[in-house]
Amino acid sequence: MSKTPYFRNTVAGRRAVLACLQPTRRHESPPAAEAPLAELKRLVQSAGATPVAEILQRREHPTGSHYLGRGKVGELQSAVRANKARVVIFDNDLTPVQGRNLEKEVGCPVMDRTELILDIFATHARTRQAKLQVELAALEYFLPRLRRMWTHLERQTGGIGVRAGAGERQIEVDRRLIGRRISDVRGELKKIRERRKQLVASRRGFAASLVGYTNAGKSTLMRALTGADVLVEDRLFATLDTRTREARLGGGLSMLLSDTIGFVRNLPHHLVESFSATLEETRGADVILHVVDMSSRAWHEEMETVRTVLADIGACEVPVQIVFNKIDLVDEPALLRRAAADFPDSIAISALRGTGLDELKNVLATRMLADAEELEILLLPPDGRASAYLRRHGRIEESRAEGTALRVRARIIPERLGALQRMPGVEILARGNHPV
């Protein structure tokens, strides 16, 4: 896609030095301190760059001028030169001043975590909605950082009486242009969100939404349950757009299943807000399938990250079903036993191998029929279309022939009852224990 013009750097193909400042905590062990750089490395690889060196500093607070201490800034300079790096990427968020000062010191572009994520999102966005959401997040991020983009004009100073140089004038022009564009994009996204709200509200039937840390295997599970030809890649943020497909649960039952954007630690709040239209499916679902990558060393922390984002988007009231995925990659059976003990209603699966999918379908079918209405129906004459409809949106408990008709005792989700009643040859004899 053509990126917003305020993306100064595309990291694809560049050699990158990774940097991170970890606040000093006495109770924290060294392996935990290394985890953020491990995730940053995967983010950088997803962006198409090559990590060539890592700089990690542990101190109580970042410095106001360069974020890292002076000694570590020197190490950063040496790492850039020694490895012929063309970009430095921080796992932290930098202020405009910190970013500008670091670029002067190391002699190459410096990106922070948010800018890297935006770069990945801009590369992966395909639909009009996703592109608008990424553009809005990028514009809001770069608006206070315009000065870093025009440092090449700051040297063009005027004479006596000149109040502003070329860079200063360009910043003011850009600030007005960005403000207007932000307003326009918000307006377009508001219309998209309203349309999606109406679409979600108009859907009848049971609906589930897949959520999880990025690369937890949501798209693989989507393909396994629906048979849909969805993109499945072993990289972060492969999915940015919501996709909804029909999932067969067995016994004729079916439901709607939606896949959404993955979450990560420290996902920028304005980015979550930008993607609110995409996440509308999650807020309107009957159940959320929280997919957890059990092969990740930080799976417990990743679960907490997902819970935080669900709270941010207002989806706390939706029932959640924990799905532990990638159990085929777990070498410690004791880990799975502990997870099952900590989350007794969870389900352990391998979406790739198909392990545990029948149990998941049964659980979803049970949830789907939890509020189903019990009916006694007479089909005059036996109507194959009505029978198929009952099996798809409910369950036939018993049936017997009565002359040319068929008497059926069934359960059906309430949202589908109206359409069944309007079918020709369908007579409702009783609802629950009450004759009609």
Image (cartoon, rainbow, N blue to C red):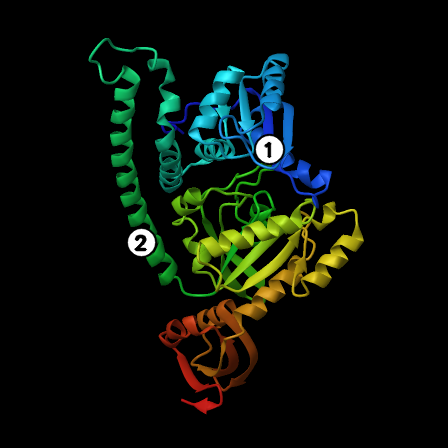
Q: Earlier in the sequence, mark 1 or mark 2?
A: 1
User: In percent of the image, x 41 and y 23: which residue is there?
Assistant: 8
- Image height check: is 402 above or below 138? below
State the count of labels: 2
- Image height check: is 117 above or below 389? above
In the displayed orientation, state which residue is furthest to the front: 160
Name the quadrant of the C terminus. bottom left
Pick the residue in front: 354 or 287: 287
Place of residue 397 in the rendered image (x, y in percent of width and height, measured from the top left):
57, 79
Whether residue 13 is visible to the viewer of this picture, yes or no, is: no
User: In percent of the image, x 45 and y 74: which residue is there?
Assistant: 383
Tag nearer the camera, 1 or 2? 1
Q: CA distance from mark 1 to mark 2?
A: 41 Å
Q: Is residue 213 left or right of residue 384?
A: right
State which quadrant residue 385 falls in. bottom left
Find numbered disc 1 in the image and state the secondary structure of the residue it sits on: strand
Find numbered disc 2 in the image and state the secondary structure of the residue it sits on: helix
